[in-house]
Image (cartoon, helix red, strand yellow):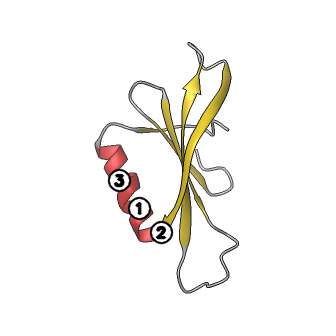
Amino acid sequence: MNSNNDFWLIDSNFVGVIRFYKDKEYSDKSIAYMFIEEGIIMGIHGENPPLMKTRKKIVIEEARLLWQKFLNEGWQKTYPRW
């Protein structure tokens, strides 16, 4: 589930997908950030490429809280989708 420090979640309907990954290019090393990309699976069986909807950058501590919130809401770990 962890490929190149990417962390993936999928919702209980197997439609919504979220990717968490560390911002490796940020110059100020005193604060670490993560990107969070949200998208949806396209096609009835996911046969089409996923559609990425949003990307945001937040500090790692907030990303950890968000990850846990999604798990508590029923999201599951999954393999890379894009």
Q: Earlier in the sequence, mark 3 or mark 2?
A: 2
> Alpha carbon of mark 1 to alpha carbon of mark 2: how far?
6 Å
The answer to whether the residue labelled 1 contacts the one labelled 2, judged by CB atoms less than 8 Å apart, is yes
- Residue drawn 44% across the image and 61% down it: 63
Instruction: Characterize the local packing of mark 1: few (<14), some (14-19) or many (20 or more) Cα atoms within 10 angstroms.
Output: few
Which secondary structure lies at badge 1? helix
Residue 38's place in the image compared with 60, above or below, is above
Which residue was labeled with disc 3?
Answer: 68
Amino acid bearing label 1:
Arg
Residue 50's place in the image compared with 28, above or below, is above
Circle on res. 64: 1
Which secondary structure lies at badge 2? helix
The answer to whether the residue labelled 3 contacts the one labelled 1, judged by CB atoms less than 8 Å apart, is yes
Instruction: Characterize the local packing of mark 3: few (<14), some (14-19) or many (20 or more) Cα atoms within 10 angstroms.
Output: few
Amino acid bearing label 3:
Gln
In this rendering, would 6 be left or right of 16?
A: right
